[in-house]
Amino acid sequence: MSKVFENPAYLRAKLYDMQHSANTAKLHDKWAYVGADGNTYTHPTEQGAMRFAGTHGLSVFTLRADYDTDVCEFSSSDEIKLRMFGKDHHAAAKIKPDMTLLDPAGNTIATMDAWATDWTEAGQ
């Protein structure tokens, strides 16, 4: 499944509108997804973006880092790069997060808790 997210241009316009009492956000579609060709496409509704992303989108893996006070997510179509990034970050971090690697459907592939030094594959 492709990841649908709020359109960055819409978010920038919304911020501008709050600062300047304007209404420029209405000129932008609110939702976006990355197509299989690598380009970002937009749609005015989340449901529409999800429908198009499901048929035309690029499947992405997600690395979730849980720091107890905050959860950060990184997405990529390359599972190996996310694994390398997660392991390197975990080794270098002073505050080590619990990490979860998710497949494009949202299923857990591997985990790494705060005390681990390598990934533990799901089901092991």
Image (spheres, rainbow, N blue to C red):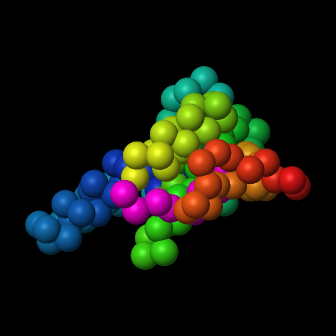
Task: State how many labels appear.
Answer: 0
Please say whether residue 62 is visible from this viewpoint. no
Q: Is residue 109 visible?
A: yes
Residue 34 point in image, percent of width and height: 57, 37
> Residue 99: within the magenta?
yes
Q: Residue furthest top?
A: 37
Compared to 97, does 102 lie above or below? above
The one of 84 and 14 positioned closer to us in this rendering: 84
- Image x and y of residue 51, in percent: 72, 50
What residue sits 48% from the left and 74% below the top?
68
Q: Residue furthest left?
A: 20
Please state if 96 lies on the left or on the right of 98 as rendered: left
View extreme (right): residue: 123
Apparent side of residue 56 relative to residue 107 in the rendered image (left or right) = left
Q: What percent of the width, then of the height, locates residue 19? A: 13, 68
Residue 110 lies in the magenta-colored region: no
Residue 106, given in percent of the width and then of the height, sits at 74, 55
Q: Nearer the viewer, residue 119 or 51?
A: 119
Magenta stretch?
94-101
Residue shown at the point (55%, 27%) measured from the top left: 38
Task: Specify the quadrant of the image occupied by residue 23.
Answer: bottom left
Q: Residue at x 64, y 31 (%)?
A: 80
In the rendered image of this protein, does residue 96 appear above or below residue 69? above
Residue positioned 74% across, 50% down in the render: 120
**Between 57 and 108, the one nearer to me in the picture:** 108
In-image side of 118 versus 20 (left or right):
right
Judged left or right of residue 99, residue 53 is right
